[in-house]
């Protein structure tokens, strides 16, 4: 799951980060045609946040996650202007007329008593659907963005019902306006699965394999499969996606949840005409769960696809540079932020970059690749933890006890050997 890296001082200038648009050759590794970059040391420069993922250059690893922050031209332009590494637009489908949202569609969970207006926001639920804007409108805005920001990375998030011709049409129309990559939404937990879309595909590995086959036979740009956490073993659909030709995996989408019950009205939140429906849970509270899911995927990729250059985009509760560093230490190439932008604004990227660079300075890391995946080796099984601790206890006891037998005394180490058996 290695990715390519290159040395460059961080910059938000679009001129510095030209798109190396990769072709998708159908050779031994479906959908791959890599561009090589060498890493050079820069001792006098700030830590370099730039990354190259599936042939796409980004000034930093921070990506706008698919959702409201990428819902139209105005907000996506703002994201580029603020310096985000890439933008993933809100998910589009062929027929937006089928998408009808309700209001209110968000609910917050605060630290402290349920319903408290003073506690810190730690959880966020949404029952929002994919884009309700006509596909033709979104495509025009994609085209305009690529004309104005030709060297920045714009990724189209797409979703369709399991009909091959529909997927092929959607892919073709998006590619015609110049998007740089696809993120396939196999993971939306609410609303869309009722139409055999979103998580309905991501939770069915046989269907997922078939749909990924259609997509990767048609697409000529990199494809990321976005995983649902609402499944027993997230490595299974991740594995199927990569085996079926996807260049990368993104995880996690939101977690199915019921945000809470209003103890005054006895109605669930968010409340629409007195009723609600389970929705997707995000924000800080999901971060530990996302770390576990990303770790599982990363270990699977390292074990089973070590010779490939697949990518991993991590999502879940990122609000600080430290949050992002944790994902990168587990092997993520990029880190997506959606709810964090909704809570803190597009300027959050500057804080994220600054804090991540501070972390890198602390550990003398000069590039993202210097520490990507560095913590992955420290995860093992509980059985192995027990074994290692028992061995460590035996070693400590042996050191404290000193010599085991009279035959172990030596002339050269006699004094130290004596001291090793003194108790005070």
Image (tube, grey):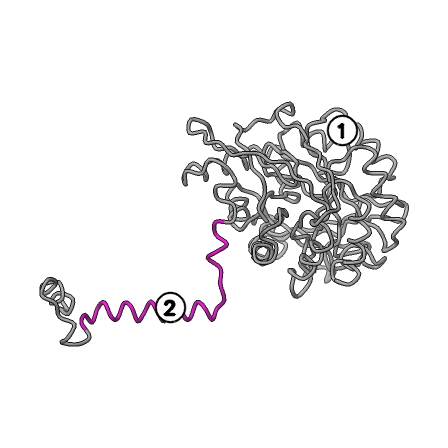
Circle 1 crowding by C-alpha within 10 Å: few under 14, some 14–19, many from 20: many
Which of the two residues, 130 or 373, is positioned nearer the viewer here? Answer: 373
Cα separation, mark 2 vs mark 1, equals: 56 Å
Q: Is residue 121 above or below residue 37?
A: below
Q: What secondary structure is the stretch in magenta mostly built from?
A: helix
Q: Is residue 272 left or right of residue 121?
A: right
| The C terminus: image quadrant | bottom left
Circle 2 crowding by C-alpha within 10 Å: few under 14, some 14–19, many from 20: few
Name the residue at 67% across, 39% down.
64
Q: What span is colored magenta in the figure? A: 374-403
Helix, strand or loop status at disc 2: helix
The mark lying in front, picked from 2 and 1, is 2
Residue 129 is covered by the magenta coloring:
no
Q: Position of residue 152 (x, y in %)?
A: 68, 30
Which of the two residues, 141 or 19, is positioned nearer the viewer here? Answer: 19
Residue 384 is covered by the magenta coloring:
yes
Q: Position of residue 165 (x, y in %)?
A: 90, 49
For mark 2, what is the residue? 389
**Quarter holding residue 270:** bottom right
Q: How many marks?
A: 2
For mark 1, what is the residue? 145
């Amino acid at each position: 799951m290695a990715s390519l890296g290159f040395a460059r001082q961080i910059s938000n200038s679009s001129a510095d980060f030209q798109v190396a648009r990769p072709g998708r050759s159908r050779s031994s590794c479906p959908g791959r045609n890599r561009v090589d970059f060498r890493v050079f040391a820069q001792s006098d420069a700030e830590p370099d946040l730039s990354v190259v993922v599936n042939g796409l250059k980004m000034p930093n690893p921070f990506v706008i996650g698919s959702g409201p922050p990428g819902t139209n031209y105005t907000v996506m332009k703002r994201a580029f202007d603020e310096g985000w590494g890439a933008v993933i637009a809100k998910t589009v489908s062929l027929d937006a007329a089928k998408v009808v949202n309700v209001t209110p569609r968000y609910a917050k969970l605060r630290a402290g008593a349920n319903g408290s207006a003073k506690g810190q926001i730690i959880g966020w639920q949404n029952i929002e659907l994919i884009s309700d804007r006509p596909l033709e409108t979104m495509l025009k805005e994609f085209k305009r963005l690529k004309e104005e920001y030709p060297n920045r990375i714009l990724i189209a998030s797409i979703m369709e019902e399991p009909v091959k011709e529909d997927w092929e049409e959607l892919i073709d129309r998006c590619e015609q306006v110049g998007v740089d990559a696809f993120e396939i939404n196999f993971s939306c937990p609410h609303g869309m699965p009722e139409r055999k879309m979103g998580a309905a595909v991501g939770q069915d590995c046989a269907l997922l394999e078939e749909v990924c086959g259609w997509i990767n036979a048609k697409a000529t740009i990199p494809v990321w499969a976005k995983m649902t956490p609402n499944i027993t073993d997230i490595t299974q659909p991740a594995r199927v996606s990569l085996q079926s030709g996807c260049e990368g995996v993104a995880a996690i989408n939101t977690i199915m949840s019921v945000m809470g019950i209003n103890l005054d009205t006895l109605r669930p939140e968010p409340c629409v005409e007195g009723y609600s429906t389970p929705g997707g849970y995000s924000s800080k509270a999901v971060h530990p769960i996302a770390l576990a899911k990303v770790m599982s995927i990363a270990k699977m990729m390292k074990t089973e696809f070590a010779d490939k250059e697949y990518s991993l985009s991590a999502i879940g509760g990122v609000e600080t540079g430290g949050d992002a560093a944790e994902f990168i230490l587990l092997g993520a190439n990029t880190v997506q932020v959606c709810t964090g932008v909704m809570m803190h604004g597009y300027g959050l990227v500057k804080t994220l970059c600054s804090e991540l660079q501070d972390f890198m300075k602390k550990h003398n890391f000069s590039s993202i690749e210097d520490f990507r995946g560095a913590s992955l080796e420290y995860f093992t099984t509980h059985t192995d933890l027990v074994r290692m601790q028992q061995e460590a206890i035996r070693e400590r006891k042996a050191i404290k006890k000193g010599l085991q037998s009279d035959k172990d005394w030596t002339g050269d180490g006699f004094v130290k050997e004596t001291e090793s058996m003194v108790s005070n």
